[in-house]
Image (cartoon, rainbow, N blue to C red):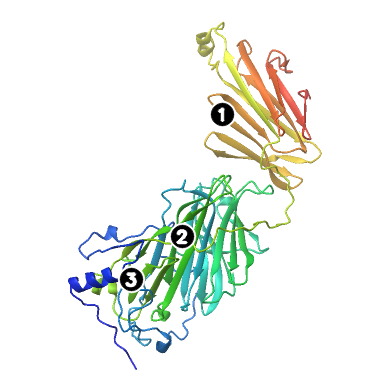
Amino acid sequence: MKRKICSLLLSSVMTLSLLAGCSGQGVSIELQNDNEEKADDEVETSNDTDSESETESNSGDSSSQADDTETFEESSFGTEGYPYDIDPSDPNPEDRMAHNIYLNPDLSNTSKAFSAFCIDFKTSDDANSTYWSLCNWNMHNGSGAYAGLQNASNKKVAVLSFWKNEHATDSDKELATLVYPDDTADTFDNEGSGVKWIRDYSWEKDHWYRMVIRAFDPEWSDGTVVEEWIQDKERGEWTLYAAYDTHIKDSYLEGNMSFFMENFNSNDCNELRSMKLNNIYVMEYGTDTWTAIDTATLSIDTEWDNKKGGYNFGATDEYFWGYTCGSGDDFVKTQASLPKKGNYTIKMSDSAPDFDFVHDYGFETTVSSEPLYRIHVNWTYFDNYEEDTWREMGVEPYENDVYVDVSDGSSTIDITSLRCETFENTDTYYALVNGTEEKIYSHTVSEEGYGIHIFRDDLTYNISWQTSTNTIDTDCYAEIWDANDNYEVRTRDDYLARSYTGAWYFAICSIKNGVLGEFDYY
């Protein structure tokens, strides 16, 4: 039989007394009224979007069992649970959905640059057409990404998706590449474009799950790889769900590292959905130490005009919690006295992950993530030449550069395939080696001079420094380090050479198959 939603049209005095009675230790609730600015209600997420799920949901039975919904004789906002009656047959002619609940961890005491993120999650109300987005973040110098668990078409799945990288200079590297499992990721183009991996992961309600997002730079790639690991905490098993090569060099996780719970299909609006979250940890970029995050902001969406129903959120000593259901009127509009945002602090109930997140991807290491040789060229001009005379002849006397000629070594290079990627003041060169494109060397310009990094031990490099005029006197030298930090200095005066055209130049060195030697005058 249809049950009417309990009225919350209480006087402001009664509302405040109820809230005061349910406030717990470490909890502060921020009351907001309809006449407050809308911006105060809005919550930042790493992608700032209330996106529809990329997984299509069938329009099956949208009802839930009313008898399974816990009711309260004395109900109030802020007490854990859903204190309002639910009508599974409540009409929804405008195809509205239940409200979203957001959680933003307090990252104010961190660098906001992370190599890993951890969160524990549980639900007792796993309604169909629900996405629990456990982490939303951005890649440094890249695009946004998100990961979590779904109940889509009554199928339990996991998600790892990346938006298109608008910062990429190479169109072939705008989309992240799935490197685990051995498959091809799907693409999406709703509300932006990107790649997604949404596949079966048989998670269960009333089980605690731990998700870890990990970013690292493997030796087999020149880009940062991001993994999603999931653990069923009751069974203790870790599963590598998916991994992408982002094609972004030296990247890391940044942004709000936020969570949201979303009803993405109006057919299942009237079902109850819930979440519990705890044990949020971040690993600062460049360290191997986990930092506990025990404070967060919970909030409800207020900016979307396609929602209905009620909500409740808060925290116990050990976890953050939230409930939404689309049955009934939109509480954001009809119950203006209800809080829309609250700050909470909990206790960590479990330690940070103590697991060696290592997976053998089976790729051969064909390029070093660190240079095999580093060469720094610096110079100081002397004043015994007539600068203005050269300029009158159309020659810029300060014009100079370091030249790197690459040829075959133990491997074969297709020099015609050489291409350059530029980021800030560094040019990185790639070419086909034995038919596969590899990183060859990089060239950096700074106030201190030129920096050359050599990445392969199976090719021949001839490296020289040349000026636009032969009569300029200069104190020029090259510092050379190998991978073991063995150090050598070579000066222009000791390695001055003359080309077949008669031009003088600084013949710095040759590096053949990883061995430093004299310049090869071929």
Circle 3 packing at 10 Å, graded few (<14), some (14-19), many (20+), is many
Residue 192: numbered disc = 2
Q: Earlier in the sequence, mark 1 or mark 2?
A: 2
Relative depth, front residue between 283 and 149? 283
Label 1 with label 3: CB-CB less than 8 Å: no
Residue 264 seen in this snapshot: no
Task: Quote the CA–CA distance across marks 1 and 3.
Answer: 59 Å
Percent position (x, y) of residue 16? 22, 69
Percent position (x, y) of residue 234? 59, 72
Q: Determine the image quadrant of residue 157.
A: bottom right
Q: Determine the image quadrant of residue 13.
A: bottom left
Which residue corresponds to the image point at 56% horizontal and 60% vertical from the top-left? 212
Task: Quote the CA–CA distance across marks 1 and 2.
Answer: 36 Å
* Element class at badge 2: loop
Residue 405 seen in this snapshot: yes
Task: Quote the CA–CA distance across marks 2 and 3.
Answer: 36 Å
Which residue corresponds to the image point at 76% horizontal and 23% vertical from the top-left? 519
Q: Which residue is mark 3?
A: 78
Q: Determine the image quadrant of residue 493.
A: top right
Mark 1 residue type: Val
Label 1 with label 2: CB-CB less than 8 Å: no
Which residue corresponds to the image point at 67% horizontal and 56% vertical from the top-left? 358
Q: Which residue is mark 1?
A: 445
In which quadrant will I find the N terminus?
Answer: bottom left
Circle 1 or circle 3, nearest the eye: 3
* Element class at badge 3: loop
